[in-house]
Image: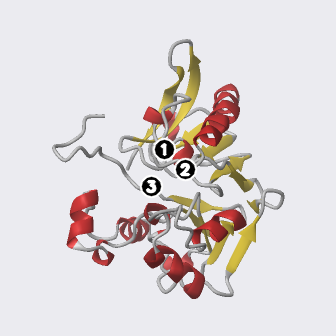
Amino acid sequence: MQPDDLNRVQQTANSLLVETDDGRLGLVDTGCGPASKFSEKEISLHGLGPGWPLLENLAARGIQPEKIDFITFTHLHWDHAGGADPNIFCNAELIVHEIEWADAHSRDPLLYKSYPPETVDPLKAGFAGRTRFLTDEKNALGPGLRLARSGGHTRGHCATVFEGALDFGSPHAGMLPAVNLAVFAGDVCSSRHNLRLVFQMSYDTFPLDTRRWKREWLPRIAREGGLLLFDHDSDIFGATLRQDPKEEFVVEATLPAA
């Protein structure tokens, strides 16, 4: 990836809109939140765009935020949980792994700036009484939908796993074969550039767990013709995989980013 003159690479902060078989609407991750919540220095440092893309994209699909029934997360870093405003998503249940929640609110100095209070404190206060905690054993979000803890990027980091008959709302979905497994990997495999076992984020707090996740899940996704969904790839949102003797795994059929 070619960096700019400030040594930054282009990334997105993808959220996934989910409609369950019983008609409930949910979000997996909520991006950074509105540009108005950041200082000019933060906007410049991160190269953030204007507006609030999450709400703009929901509106473009005719969905008001009060119609969102649940919000869940791969993890609670600012660029994944920053858009979960409890006043905007006033009817949503927050669903999160208990380990991730505990670490996010621990104020552990070893997790330096990983969980800014301005991101996590409003979740605790604003979603009080409508927060559900999942565990490694009880991890179902609904039929065919679950959080599978990966660790790696954070101790409580989870991939979101969809199993069963899946329909994709993307206009490019016709480019894909029939898919019965989709995995929103979060930051354990944030883009196609991170497919190699050792190509991972420098932010990972448990790097070997990230590699263990890839060693377990990437072969399964390739073998079963599943779809791997990326949270930070600026060009493609999802891809099927095939094994490659040199590169380990490479993308095959792709869903372009919005």
Q: Give me the C-alpha separation between circle 1 and circle 3.
A: 10 Å
Identified by mark 3, the residue type is Asn
- Residue 152, how many percent across, how many down? 61, 47
Quick one: 139 or 237, which is closer to the camera? Answer: 139
| Left or right: 204 as drawn, with respect to 7 | right
Residue drawn at (66%, 39%), measured in percent from left and top?
213
| Left or right: 246 as drawn, with respect to 44 | right
**Vertical placement of residue 91 versus 116, above or below:** below
Residues at circles 2 and 1 in contact by the CB criterion of under 8 Å? yes
Identified by mark 2, the residue type is Gly
**Residue carrying label 3:** 14
**Residue carrying label 1:** 190
Identified by mark 1, the residue type is Ser
**Residue carrying label 2:** 186
Mark 3 Cα shell of 10 Å, populated few (<14), some (14-19), many (≥20):
many
- Residue 186, how many percent across, how many down? 54, 50
Report helix, strand or loop for mark 2. Answer: helix
Residues at circles 3 and 2 in contact by the CB criterion of under 8 Å? no
Q: In which image quadrant can residue 98 be found?
A: bottom right
